[in-house]
Amino acid sequence: MNKPHNASGLLEQLSRKGKIAAAEEVRRELVGMEVPIRPSLAYYRAARCLLRRRPWPPNRAEMFANWLSLLPSMAETNKATHHLINLESALFFNSSELDLENVAHFGVILSSKGYIRSMGAPVVACLTRYAHPDVSLRILDEMIAADGDYKRNKLRLTSRAETRYKDTSKRLWSILVRTHCTTGRPEVALQMAKRAHERGFHLTQYTYQYLLGKLEADGLKESAEEARALFGRRSLDVAKSRFINESLSPPKLIPPISPKQNVAVNRALALAMLKRSSQSGLPAYAANIVPYFNIYKTGLRGNIVVNKLRSRAYRLSLYATSTVLLAELLHHHCRGQFMHVLWVFEKYFHVVGVPAEDVKRRLWKRDHYPPHLRLHYWTLPPRITETTFNLPSKLWPTAHHTALVWTALVQLCESEEELFALYDQLLARSAQSQRSVVARVEQKRHEHEPVERELHGGGSDSSSTPIAAPAERYDAAHFRPFLVAFTFLRGANRALQVLDDMQDRGVALSAPILSAGAALQARHGEPAAALRMLDVMCEMLLHSHSHSHSPSHSPPSLYHHHHHSDTDPELRSELLARGGEAGKRRVLLTAHTAVLRGLLDRRAIVQAQHVAELLRDRLGYVEGSSGGGGDGGGGGNARTDAALRFLRRLETEGPRAAPPDPPPELDEHGHPQRRFYPFLRKRDGEVIKALNAKPPREPTANRSVRRSAPRRSSSRKAALLPR
């Protein structure tokens, strides 16, 4: 028996092959001839390719809505969920620009096909966070109305389905209210809660509690009473008591993770750190969980012990999961396993905030393995199934995650051209992020403009910048690997240009990057710049506290020299006496120690003596003391004491005094090995190859002169090698 003729078969075939231009032409012809197009999952491929196309076509929103409308409804197929999740990922996370118009189309069209329960929550949360409140409310009303039409026309709504329909609407309204609270708009959230009651929808009890906590935390007592009145049934408590707690009792000290303890104890300690963070609001530091991976993770995928920690962290919260994965990235970063850093990031996070093409190009692919080693999904061995952590959806990376990925990409650059191309991408992305922030600030100043302007990112004659995705935020940690690489490659002056680029793009100078820059300047023969950076660090840390309530005061400049290079004694005592200043003192101690050691390696004894005086006068450092005059941690004392002892040996023995550290490992040419930076090894190899190459053959007339010329000694060749 012959199959019925499918008039849109060619369109499905073109969509499956990814020929989007030809498929778009065929679709227009079928629509023009009023030929019905059968819904099919093949058009998911066309919609996804359209979202990935760069640059964006001018009618992108219209084309995306057309392809979405051709997808089958939930009643016609039960295999669309996986495809829609991939489509959602491409829409939300595949670009540094957030297209709110397509997000709205995505929510309304899929709601009309019965997918509001699975796809409605991310759409409502995204529009509530980034669009005008009236726009997000209008789109939510359209989504609920479209879902109601689908249930009445396709499913013939029953009483049981009607209850489920109301539960879905209640959930979406609750997400809208809570998102307004988390974005710092509790009063708007209260107005949205009132509108939900006007439409006959009651929110979840947790949403009322969450709203009440935000209102009381902001001191809005009258609004808080209105929120209590909306709930109406019984007394309403605050969802998270830390919103209104003015002081928290000091947390209990959790012992560190140690190899001397068994697996269960170490896992319980890691989970206790994460649980305390979720209950008290205190941050959970990934560095405290790194020892867990140092002990138990022996390969790329890990083992059951590592996978169990990921799973238990996911039961706590997504924030706990993100912290555990950040610790895993730090584990590979500290070991120099930069390919592993890229693999973990690509597996568990959306590839945003980093050059996705460079990340995916460096990762291993199936074609890299011989056929007999390739795995098939129906016969996965236990080493894969037992170590695979299947997240329902990938996580949003923070700036800490993306900074480690940028560092890994720098370390994996094979040539100078690749390194500078990567730096150009960072400059372009950071400039785009800065323009997006300015554009959002301007939008907040003109909230009285029409809501359509907020949805489309500007009018037809406007040149406003589209909204940047939340992960597209760049700080000093993203520029630090380039600062180090350029210093090794081009010298100290190139490092100062990196700092200029940061300030031109609105990226604030941080104490860690100034510490690294000062150490590099000292090691490469620029003691004046190193000492100036130390002064700026001290002024910056004082400025962050002394002038926290003075918005008119500007931070210290890196290039304008002040007459009082040393910190004032009264300010120094305030810096060291206030609570929480031990961490600042450790940062300053580490920076001074690094600069001191760099100056000693250059045998700049006079400047090194000045830094030693700063350690005693500015920081109150006492050599040989475990506390160091209030150090609050002995992490830098051993290195500082060793540097001071080396300074005294240089003063007595002269430049030939042996350094305290063991000599670095030498390569086959007798030069210090560089553990990383392949582009530096490539450059050194090219220089050595050029020096060892035979000279070109001379003409016959000059052969006699060549025979009479003395042979070049090997010592001269050794002197030309790069040190």
Image (cartoon, grey):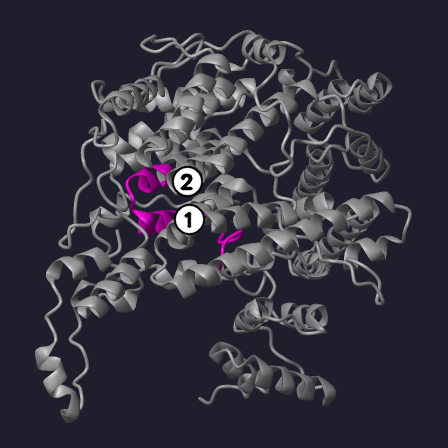
Q: Is residue 92 magenta?
A: no
Relative to 270, is 125 above or below?
below
Relative to 246, is 75 above or below?
below
Q: Position of residue 694 (x, y in %)?
A: 15, 75
Residue occupying image coordinates x 45% and y 33%? 323
> Which element is circle 1 on?
helix
Q: Is residue 51 left or right of residue 351?
A: right
Residue 93 in which image quadrant? bottom right
Q: Residue 520 carries which label?
A: 2
Q: Along the polypeptide, which appears first: circle 1 or circle 2? A: 1
**Tag 2: amino acid:** Leu
Residue occupying image coordinates x 34% and y 20%? 640
Q: Is residue 338 magenta?
A: yes
Q: Which mark is residue 596?
A: none
Q: How far apart are marks 1 and 2 (CA)?
A: 7 Å
Residues rendered magenta in the picture = 329-356
Q: Where is residue 37 in the image (x, y as percent from the top left)?
A: 63, 80
> Which element is circle 2 on?
helix
Residue occupying image coordinates x 41% and y 58%? 359
Q: In this view, does 116 lie to the left or right of 4?
A: right
The residue that label 1 is drawn on is 487
Magenta region, main secondary structure: helix
User: As drawn, which residue projects farthest toward the left?
Assistant: 707
Residue 555 in which image quadrant? top right
Q: Is residue 277 left or right of residue 721?
A: right
Crowd rating for badge 1 (residues with CA inside 10 Å; few <14, some 14–19, many 20+)? many
Q: Look at the image and tell me whether residue 472 can be seen.
A: no
